[in-house]
Amino acid sequence: MQWEIVIGLEIHAQLATRSKIFSGASTTYGAAPNSQASLVDLGYPGVLPVLNAEAITMAVRFGLATNCEIARRSVFARKNYFYPDLPKGYQISQYELPIVHGGSVEVVLEDGSTRTVNIVRAHLEEDAGKSLHEDFAGMSGIDLNRAGTGLLEIVSAPDLRSAAEAGAYMRKIHALVRYLGICDGNMQEGSFRCDANVSVRPRGEAKLGTRTELKNLNSFRFVEKAIEIEAARQIELIDGGGKVLQETRLYDPDRDETRPMRSKEEANDYRYFPDPDLLPVVVDERLIADVRASLPELPDAKRERFIRDYALPAYDAQVLTVERALADYFEAVAKRTKATPKIAANWVMGELTGALNREGLEIGATRVSAAALAALLDKITAGTISGKIAKEVFEALWTDGRRGEGLVDEIIEKRGLTQISDSSLIDKLVAEVIAANPAQVEQVRAGKQQVLGFLVGQVMKASRGKANPQQVNEALRKQLGLP
Amino acid sequence: MHTRTLAQLAGDLRARRFSATELTRHLLGRLERLGGELNAFITVTAEQALAQAAAADRRLAKDEATPLTGIPLAHKDIFCTAGVKTSCGSRMLDNFIAPYDATVVERLANAGAVMLGKTNMDEFAMGSSNETSFYGPVRNPWNHALVPGGSSGGSAAAVAARIAAAATATDTGGSIRQPAALSGITGLKPTYGRVSRYGMIAFASSLDQAGVLTQTAEDAALLLEVMAGFDARDSTSLDEPVPRYSQLIGEPWDNVTIGVPESFFDDGLEPDNAAAVRAALAELEKLGAKLKSIELKYIHLSVPAYYVVAPAEASSNLSRFDGVRFGHRAEPPVGDFQGSRAAGEDLTTFYMRNRGEGFGAEVKRRILTGTYVLSAGYFDAYYLQAQKARKLISDDFARAFRDVDFVAGPTTPSPAFKLGEKASDPIAMYLNDIYTIGANLAGLPAISIPCGFVRNLPVGLQLVAPPLAEGRLLKVAHHFQRATDWHARIPPSYA
C-alpha cells in the first residue's frame, strides 16, 4: 500500500524581549540557577502578572509577516497542571482567543517547487522552568530562570507531507523570526524548538490517521529524523495489523527511536479558563499600522529582488537570504565592488561562509569586512591578482582580523603577490618551460590539448602563482604556433 | 483614648493631646489584655509598631504628618508584610515570612500609619464565621459565644473591641460587610479595581477587593483616599483619579434616590432584622432621600453563581501552594531518607501530603468544587452558566442605577450566630452572604453601617452604589451617622 505522511508542527519561538513576559526579570541565558527569577516568576503569594507590551508587538510582527489575522481582542487563559518547574501550578497561555490566526507561508522545496503551509494560529504564553534530574543524588533540582520567559507558539495546519517538508518549513519560520527580530533562533539554548504531530494514511484517503505528538525537537536534523522514524514505525505497526495510539512520544537521538511519554488516557485535563489577573489584550489599528510600517524586507521579497536586481541564480538568492545579516553583507559587497554580483555571491557563499563555519562564528563576528572583501574582488577584476592568489589574501585578511579595506593593498604588497602581466617576463618564462619539457611539447603539437594545461601549470609554478594565467595561455599558444 | 474615632485621633495627635507612641502603647496594652480572649490577632508586631509610632511622632513634630500619621491599624493576615509572618489563616503558610509589602500596606505605612499586628481570618478568606482559621475562631466582642462574622473576623473584632483604630480587610463575597454588620462597625468594599490587589493573597481574583473596617464612614474615607488608586503592579487596578473622600463626605446632602429590592425582605430575613433595616431606611427618608421599590430580577442567582466562580478561581489560585518553594512541607514518612524520591515517594504523593496537611476542610471543599466545575465536560454546564448569571446580575444593577443612586437593604439575614451553629452545614453558612455577593459579582462598591440592634446584637444596613461612586456612598453613610448613634455603641466589656 502507498502511504502518505501527514505532519503539523507546533513551533515554540522564545521572544527576544529583554525582560520576561509577565515580570521584570531578565531573560539572559546561562545565569546561575534561580538568579533570574523574581517573586512573580517564583509564584509567590500575592504577586500578579503584568504583560510586557513588547511581546504583543512581536506577535503582531509575526502575524503581519505571515498574512495572518490580528485579533483586535485576545485573552490569556490559565492552563492548570502540577509540576515543580511550573511555580504557579498553571501556565499563562492563550487558548480560545489567540492574538494571531489564519495565515500562511510559502516553502520552497529541494526540487524547486513551492508548497503553501497554513498557519492556524500563533499565541503568546510563558515558558516553564527546568527540572534537573542529574547531580542531585535521588532528588531533583529546579531552575526557574526560564520560568516566565515569553514564547510565541506557532501552530501549522497538517499541511506537511514529508520529513523534508517539515524541515524546510521549520527553516522558513526560523529565518522569518530572526528577520523580524522577535527570536534569536538559538536552538542549542532552546530558544527555537518544536513539537511534531505525525500521522499516516493510505494515499488518497481523506480522513486523517491517528496522530502521535513528538515533543521538544530542538534541531532541524532531529525534526527530520524523528518524523522519518516515527512515520516508519506507524506504517510498520499498521501493516502488521496494529493500531496507532494517540500519545505523546519522545525522540531519542542516541538510539534513533521514539518512545511513549504519556498516552491520551493519562493526559492532563488542563481546566483552561480566562486568567482573571490579566485584562484582554486589545490591539488597535494604530499599533497594527505602526508595526506594518516598521517591518523589514522579508526573506521571500529579498530573494526575488536578489534574483531580479543582481541576476543571481535562485539557489544563490535562497542561500544568501536565509539570514538577514548575511544578505546585508552580500549587498554591501555587491554594491562596493566592480566585480559582478555573481562573483560577490560566490565569495560570500564560499570563502566567507567557509571561514565562519570553520570557527563557528555568526556573520556579525566576521573577521573580513564587506568593504575589505569588495576591495579584494576589485583586485581580481583589475587583474592585479589572480583568483587563486586572492584566496591567499583572504586567508591573510582573516588571520589579521583588522578588517580595514586598506589592508588588501598592504598584504598584496608586503607579500609581493601582485600578478605578473609584464609580457616580456611571461614570454621568457614560457620559453624556459618549452625548453625544459620537450616530450610534453611534442604531445601538444600532436594535438593533445589537455597537456597544454600541464605546461600552463609549469609556467604558473615558475612564477610562484603570480603570472596572469590568461597571458600565459596566450604566450604558450603563440610560441608553440597553435591557433 | 481607644474610644475615639480615627478622625478624632488624627486631630488629637496634631493637637498633641497625646503622642503616637502613647496611643500605640495604650492599644498594644489593650491588645495584650483583650486580644487573647477574642483571638483577633495571629501576629502582634509590638516592636515594629513602637518604632513606627516613634517615627510618626517625629513627623508630627515637624508638621509633616498626614491624617493617618501615628494611627494604629491592624492588617488582615491576607496582606503580605515584609519580614512578618503572613499566614492567610492557614497551616499552609504558618511558616511564611513575606519578602515584600502589599501595595495597601506600603501606602498606609508611607502615610505614617502604625501596624499593630496581623488579624485572624478564615483560612484563605473562605468562610463567613472565622471558624475555618488554622488559628482557631475569633469571638464576637458583643458576646463571646457568637461568631464575629468572616472572613475578616479578626479585623472586625479588633475594631469593634476598640483595640485598633481601624483595620484593613478584604471582601470576595461579603467578607468585609458581613463581619461589619455582625460586629456593629462600618465596613467598606470599594469598586473592583479601586484598590490594588498586589500583595493580597488571592482567593478569587475577579471578585477580591481590599477595603476597610472602621468605626465610621468618615474614618473609611480617610483610609480609602490613601489606599485607592492605580498600581502598575496590578493590571486590574483602575487608572482613575482618587477623590478627596474625607472632604467630599461633608458636602451638602443632594437629591438622593434609594432603591429597595423588596425580595431582600422575604422569608430568609429575620423579622426583627427587617424592622431595624426598615427603620434605618425611614431615617434616611427623613434626612431627605427618596425611597423607591425596585426589582433585581436575577439576584437569586448570586449565591449559586458565586459558589461556582469563586471556587473555580480559587482552585487555580491555590495551586501554587505545593510545598516546593515556600509554605508547608510535610515531614517525610518514617524511615524515609531526607524526603527523597529515591526512598519511594513519588511526586503526586509529595503534593498530596503537603496539601493534605497544609489545607483545612473548607479550603479543600472549595478546591474540589472549583476543580470539578472547570473540568472537561462540566465547564459549560457550570463555569460558563455561572458567568452568564454573573452578567445578568451586573445588568440588573446597571438597570437599577438608571433610576436610583443606591440599592439598599440588610447586610445579613440575621445578627451574629453561635460558634459551631453553622460550621457543619456549608449551605446554611453560604446563605449568610446572600445579600452581599451581588456587589462582588457586579464589581460594585458597597458599605455596611450599623443600623440597630436585635437581641442586643448589632445589625447592618447595606448600601450598594454604581462603579467608582465610593464618594457618594460614604457621604450618605456619613450623613446617616451624623443623625444616629448606632455606630458609636461599644460592646459593654470593651468600652
Image (cartoon, rainbow, N blue to C red):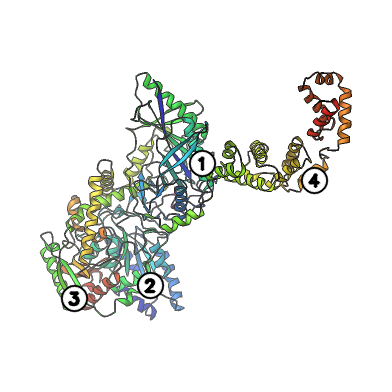
Q: Are marks 4 and 2 in contact (CB under 8 Å)?
A: no
Mark 4 and mark 3, same subunit? Answer: no
Can residue B436 be seen in the rendering of this structure?
no
Q: Is residue B435 left or right of residue A42?
A: left
> Label 1: few (<14), some or many (≥20) within 10 Å?
many
Q: Is residue B292 left or right of residue A28?
A: left
Q: Position of residue A161 (x, y in %)?
A: 43, 31
- Res A417 → quadrant: top right
Type of amino acid under label 3: Ala
Kindly report the distance in space between the C-alpha atoms of the residues bearing marks 1 and 3. Answer: 68 Å
Secondary structure beneath label 4: helix
Between discs 2 and 3, the one toward the N terminus: 2
Type of amino acid under label 4: Glu
Q: Decide: is A464 above or below B277.
A: above
* A41 within the magenta span: yes
Q: Residue at x 44, y 27 (%)?
A: A258
Type of amino acid under label 1: His
Secondary structure beneath label 1: helix
Q: Position of residue A261 (x, y in %)?
A: 40, 31
User: Which is more foreground, mark 4 or mark 3?
Assistant: 4
Kindly report the distance in space between the C-alpha atoms of the residues bearing marks 4 and 1. Answer: 40 Å
Q: Disc 3 designates what residue? A: B289
Q: Decide: is B378 above or below B177.
A: above
Mark number for residue A174?
Answer: 1
Q: Disc 2 designates what residue? A: B68
Kindly report the distance in space between the C-alpha atoms of the residues bearing marks 4 and 3. Answer: 97 Å
Secondary structure beneath label 3: loop
Mark 2 and mark 3, same subunit? Answer: yes
Q: Chain of mark 4?
A: A
Kindly report the distance in space between the C-alpha atoms of the residues bearing marks 2 and 3. Answer: 32 Å
Kindly report the distance in space between the C-alpha atoms of the residues bearing marks 1 and 2. Answer: 58 Å
